[in-house]
Image: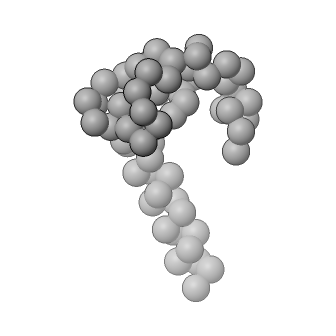
């Protein structure tokens, strides 16, 4: 999935969630290993752990259906 699919044209204008500090960043400020994103809004980035968990749950459910 590309950034454009997420509605993001320029990563510098996107928001990221720093998993180490638990802070939202405007544009990629920290090391990529410490970031989740990009997200289109600050609010969405603040919910990054929740969003990641939801996506992981959906993938697990799809995998279970395939078995």
* Count of marks overlaid on the render: 0
**Residue 27 percent location from the top left of the image:** 51, 18
Point out residue 43 in the picture as x, y percentages from the top left corner: 42, 21
The quarter of the displayed image where residue 29 is located: top left
Quarter in which the C terminus is drawn: bottom right
Q: Position of residue 1 (x, y in %)?
A: 70, 45
How is the rendered protein coloured?
one colour
- Residue 22 is left or right of residue 46, and the answer is left
User: Who's the residue at 56% across and 74% down the image?
Assistant: 63
| Residue pictured at 52% horizontal, 59% vertical | 58
One can see residue 17 in this view: no
Residue 63 in the image: above or below residue 2: below
**Residue at image x 71%, y 21%?**
9
Q: Which residue occupies the foreground of this view, 67 or 21?
A: 21
Task: From the top left corner, tell me how far across and down residue 35 is, in percent.
Answer: 43, 35
The answer to whether residue 54 of the structure is visible from this angle is yes
Compared to residue 29, the image places residue 20 above or below, namely: below
Q: List the single residue furthest toward the front.
A: 31
Q: Where on the picture, by quarter, is residue 45?
A: top left
4 w.r.t. 63: above or below = above
Horizontal side of residue 10 vs 60, given as left or right: right
x 71%, y 39%: residue:
2
- Pick whichever, 10 or 49, lies toward us: 10
Nearer to us in this view, 49 or 66: 49
Residue reaching furthest bottom?
Answer: 67
């Amino acid at each position: 999935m590309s950034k454009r699919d997420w509605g993001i044209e320029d990563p510098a204008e996107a928001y990221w969630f720093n998993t180490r500090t638990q802070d939202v960043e405007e544009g990629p400020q920290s090391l990529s290993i410490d970031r989740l994103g990009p997200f289109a809004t600050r609010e969405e980035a603040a919910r990054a752990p929740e969003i990641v968990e939801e996506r992981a749950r959906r993938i697990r459910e799809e995998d279970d259906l395939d078995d």
